[in-house]
Amino acid sequence: MILRQRADVTEALFILRASHEGDPWSGHMAFPGGHKEPSDDSIRHTAERETLEEIGLDLCQHAQFIGEIDAVRANPRGRDLDLVVTPLVFSLKGGDIQLQPNYEVADILWGSLQGMYSGDSLTTGEFTVQGEQHRFPGYGVEGQIVWGLTYRMLDQFFGMMDPHWEPREF
């Protein structure tokens, strides 16, 4: 999770994943990231490497590491995978930074954390899961919907920041 401060608004960076056959998260909104490689010294190194590869942002140079959020289990429907995702939080140090998405990223979008936290950007969307349409809650960001695993990570982040915060139900 990469944060930036714009006037009185804190924003989070999201990527719109490019569509690829066989990718369970194809075309979804997400945070930059990916699988830990044997050459990665730590989960933090994985996040820094993947962010540089996916959007051209050098977190070591342009961001401050804030901390780690509790791991979230991910089991994409229709796939025999049991993943554990460890979200890390970074804050950009300065002004605007030129981002260069690679082939895995269709777009880079920024969403207001205040709008998500307050429920102003809360919405639902219809998504195809294993060939069937389902409605899921999410946060609207620039015409896209952050749902599923990334939505759960955001709710967990809000709960860590405010112990009295309650996830909103639809």
Image (cartoon, rainbow, N blue to C red):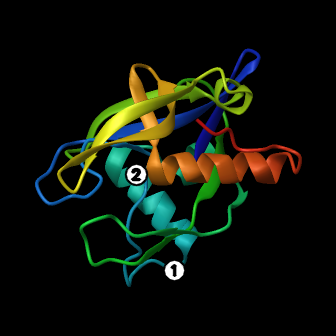
Residue located at (64% from left, 32% from top): 4
Name above or below for residue 8 compared with residue 97: above
Residue in front for this viewpoint, 161 or 109: 161
Give how far across and how far down residue 54 sits, in percent: 33, 49
Under mark 1, the amino acid is: Asp
Residue in front for this viewpoint, 32 or 154: 154
Identify the residue at the far right of this view. 164
Name above or below for residue 39 compared with residue 49: below
Say which quarter of the image contains residue 121.
top right
Residue located at (40% from left, 78% from top): 82
Residue 7 relative to residue 108: left or right: right
Q: Secondary structure at mark 2?
A: helix
Give how far across and how far down residue 26 sits, in percent: 24, 49
Q: Determine if residue 94 is in view.
A: yes
Which of the labelled discs sits on residue 52, or is there none? 2
Residue in front for this viewpoint, 126 or 162: 126
Residue 8 relative to residue 56: left or right: right
Residue located at (55% from left, 77% from top): 42
Which of the labelled discs sits on residue 41, or is there none? 1
